[in-house]
């Protein structure tokens, strides 16, 4: 069992379809009104059917008042970390501290290369991501000028700013051992997707993260565990799934999918309260043992 006891949060995985942008914005605004904690937007710039993730997040930031916003996950090979840091910090300031940063090493390399991005081996992708985290943190620092001589990214006396309105979390989407070690050593959260990983995989990956965090002198419970759950499910099934993942595997944030706005209302009105109740009951029972 690996329940870290963190307060649960719930998000919506908003598909940035360009065919009906008004509907996309309407769903994002509805999430804010219904009390969702986060909105995650996938970042596939090479997908012609999708709006640009950062542009959509920016518009949503102007149309909402409380919900947190994050790319789920940003495509690092097509977004250099210094500019990504600037964009995230700027939106965080403009929204009053409502931005987090999901970050990925890259996928769909043919499509990335077609847009002029680099084609990296798995090892190079992890190295670039490691480098990028250093750059992001330097660009968010209060130093007057920062430099970084990395293998993939560098800074040469650049003046950081603006500073984010709050400490932006860096949540890494990854599954392999080197990526999981990176999460434990350097990141603020782990952001996998159910379907790419199962319950056994989550338990094994979380243990790797905890081991790496402990070796680095970090408290494993300080690392958030955010899980994308795509696809519809009946209320009882989704409640059992999420409650089990929270108490048995330490998942503290669930980013859920919905077919339409009525489904969003069902999630907010029925499913999420039921998950919270079940987790509270399970935790109370565990504490009594």
Image (cartoon, rainbow, N blue to C red):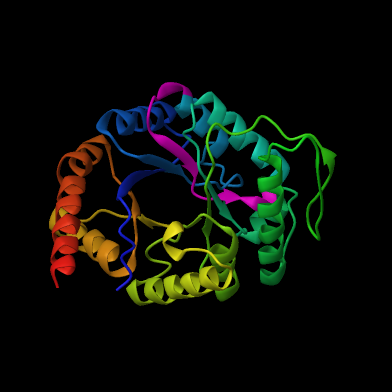
- Magenta residues, start to end: 62-78
Quarter holding the C terminus is bottom left
What x and y, as percent, mark residue 59? Answer: 49, 26
As for residue 75 lying within the magenta part, the answer is yes
Task: State the residue at coordinates (28%, 64%).
Answer: 245
Looking at the image, which residue is at 52% across and 36% down? 166
Q: Is residue 164 left or right of residue 263?
A: right
Q: Is residue 172 left or right of residue 21?
A: right
Q: Name the residue at the right extreme.
A: 156
In the rendered image, which quarter is residue 6 located in? bottom left
- Between 1 and 119, the one nearer to me in the picture: 1
Whether 103 is among the magenta residues is: no
Decide if residue 234 is in sight here. Answer: no
Residue 273: x, y in percent? Answer: 17, 46
Q: Quadrant of residue 25?
A: top left
Q: Position of residue 266 (x, y in %)?
A: 18, 41
Position of 74 with respect to 252 (left or right) is right
Instruction: Give the camera-side residue of 101 and 223.
Output: 223
State which quadrant residue 236 falls in.
Answer: bottom left
The x and y percentages for residue 85 are: 65, 40
Give the left or right position of residue 243, taking residue 219 as reference: left
Residue 218 in sight in this render: yes
Say above or below: 101 vs 233: above
Residue at point 22% right, 40% down? 268
């Amino acid at each position: 069992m690996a329940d870290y006891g963190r307060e649960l949060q719930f998000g919506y995985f908003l598909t940035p379809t360009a065919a009906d942008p008004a509907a996309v914005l309407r769903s994002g605004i509805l999430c804010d009104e219904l009390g969702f904690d986060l909105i995650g937007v996938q970042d596939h710039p090479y997908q012609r059917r999708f709006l640009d993730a950062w542009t959509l997040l920016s518009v949503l930031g102007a149309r909402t008042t409380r919900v947190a916003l994050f790319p789920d996950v940003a495509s690092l090979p097509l977004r250099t970390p210094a500019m990504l840091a600037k964009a995230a910090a700027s939106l965080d300031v403009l929204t009053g501290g409502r931005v987090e940063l999901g970050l990925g090493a890259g996928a769909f390399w043919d499509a990335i290369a077609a847009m002029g991005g680099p084609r990296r081996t798995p090892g190079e992708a992890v190295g670039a991501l490691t480098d990028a985290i250093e750059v992001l943190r330097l660009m968010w620092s209060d130093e007057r000028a920062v430099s970084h001589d990395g293998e993939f990214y560098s800074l040469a006396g650049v003046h950081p700013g603006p500073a984010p309105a709050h400490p932006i979390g860096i949540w890494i989407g990854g599954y392999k051992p080197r990526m999981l070690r990176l999460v434990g050593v350097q990141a603020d959260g782990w952001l996998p997707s159910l379907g790419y990983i199962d319950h056994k995989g989550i338990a094994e990956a979380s243990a790797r993260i905890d081991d790496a965090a402990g070796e680095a002198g970090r408290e494993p419970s300080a690392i958030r565990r955010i899980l994308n759950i795509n696809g519809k499910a009946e209320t009882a099934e989704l409640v059992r799934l999420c409650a089990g993942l929270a108490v048995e595997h330490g998942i503290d944030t669930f980013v859920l999918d919905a077919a339409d706005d009525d489904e969003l209302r069902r999630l907010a009105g029925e499913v999420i309260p039921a998950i919270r109740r079940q987790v509270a009951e399970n935790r109370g029972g565990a504490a009594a043992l």
